[in-house]
Image: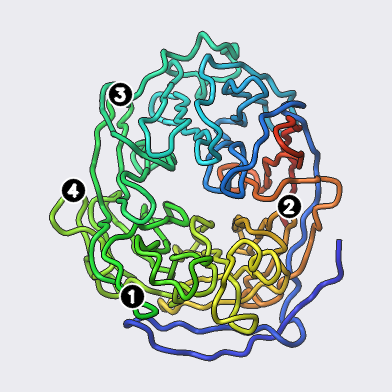
Amino acid sequence: MSAPSSRRAALAASLVLGVTVAVVVPPGPAVAAAPGVTRLGDTQLDPTALYFVSYDGLVNNNSYGDGIVSHAGYQYAAWYTSTRNAVLARRQLPSGAWQALQLPHRLSTDDSHNSIALGISPGDGRLHVAMDTHDSEVYYVKSEAGLVSSPGSRSWLASRFGAEQRSLDGVGLGAMTYPQFRVAPGNRLQLSYRTGRSGNGANELAEYDGSTWRRLGRWSSATGPYVANGATSTTRNMYLHGLTYGPGGRLHAAFTWREGNSAVTCNSGGLTNHDTGYVHSDDQGRTWRNNAGTVVGTTNSGSLVSISSPGLVVDPLPPNYGLINQESQDVDSTGNPHVIISYVPGRFTSCVTSYASARRANGRAFHLFRNPSGVWRKVEIPVPLNATGRSQVVLDAADNAYVVLPYGRIVTASRASGYTDWTVRFDGAGLNAFGEVIVDRARVESDGVLSILYQRASSGSTPSPIRVVDFRLG
């Protein structure tokens, strides 16, 4: 634990593409006390989980993964063990023993993108598993009906899962990346994924109604011109910080663009990521609107969300600062989004020449959030990242913010302070976490407990323990 490092906000507002952005620079005494966390326990899933580093990450806990989720009083986790087999585990909450089963599938390649995503369809009580894909066809498995809706009456056996598929019950998705499941209103389960490649790809949705999958189609476009540093890029992809349903069934999506032409960077060692954008949908991903409510795209049509759509950017940043993609977001009780982004601030450099080393030396995370008036505000979290990786944000029932930084460190800020009293509440001591972690968002909402899945640092390809640590929020 560390002493509070509270700050008073100084505001500087600017108007960017029709969106008011207020930058909050924290320097003085606290307005309110940031909430605390209480460590409840730390349990081991596997002493010898698969370990290799690629793209600066681990396949078992890249932050865009969905490898831990809760439902109906049970928690579920997924990872690859030392034999490369996919493993699924469950425990009865709050502190039951983990039960594990091994699926026949073995990881096909040493690529940290090929993580495991878990989804639950409340309508029929199935557990869905999408895994082992990076610009390739997904491997998909689903359980028998009722396995997760009546878990106390069902044994945890691999035989309760169906055969492995390369489609969603015959619905082909083609080559894809980053599968993520989301429960939508009406007990529907949606799968978000990217088709195409980094710098030239599109976001798509598929939907399961409790019996049948169907492909909804693309909702973002790769095309359009973008100019920076004297160069023009004509292709890109939208990297999501998340897809999150909030009060009233609104679907929120914050994102960054990645350009296909590396010449738009100030240096070839940087990243072509730029800007933070935002859209939302009030019809479960069929129609998309910008921050002002203007329609900017319709799924599976000739009018998709694109670089040329008006009013998308809520925090402008050129591709000079090592902005990372696919960080995290949450939505508060008033229906407003909160997003974590991270990059190297301009006080350190105006041109990142090596994004990995620059982020380790000077990277900072920022809390970007929209208030009820539609104004976006940004607060720097005054803790060095000391890492290339991403952070996770969750909100408690009182809309206080908790951010899990790399290595499992937890910083918090209160809603009452306007999210300016950022304080380190857990410094990661004893975890020996590799870097990025993933969190169980459903358990935060249902129990007020933050479960963090992390893997201990190792070297080379030596397997290491994968574990879950729990904290009571507030």
Task: Please state if 376 lies on the left or on the right of 223 as rendered.
Answer: right
Mark 4: give few (<14), some (14-19) or many (20+) Cα within 10 Å. Answer: some
Question: Relative to the observer, which residue lies in front, 225 or 69?
Answer: 225
> Amino acid under label 1?
Ala
Name the residue beneath numbered marker 1: 231
Tell me which numbered mark, 4 or 2, is placed earlier along the sequence: 4
Question: Relative to the observer, which residue lies in front, 138 or 420?
Answer: 138
Circle on res. 300: 4
Task: Please state if 10 lies on the left or on the right of 137 as rendered.
Answer: right
Q: Which residue shows up at 64% across the image and 70% down it?
A: 364
Q: Quadrant of the C terminus?
A: bottom right
Tell me which numbered mark, 4 or 3, is placed earlier along the sequence: 3
Query: Distance between the Cα atoms at labels 3 and 2?
Result: 40 Å
**Mark 3, secondary structure of its residue:** loop
Q: Quadrant of the N terminus?
A: bottom right
Tell me which numbered mark, 3 or 1, is placed earlier along the sequence: 3
Circle on res. 407: 2
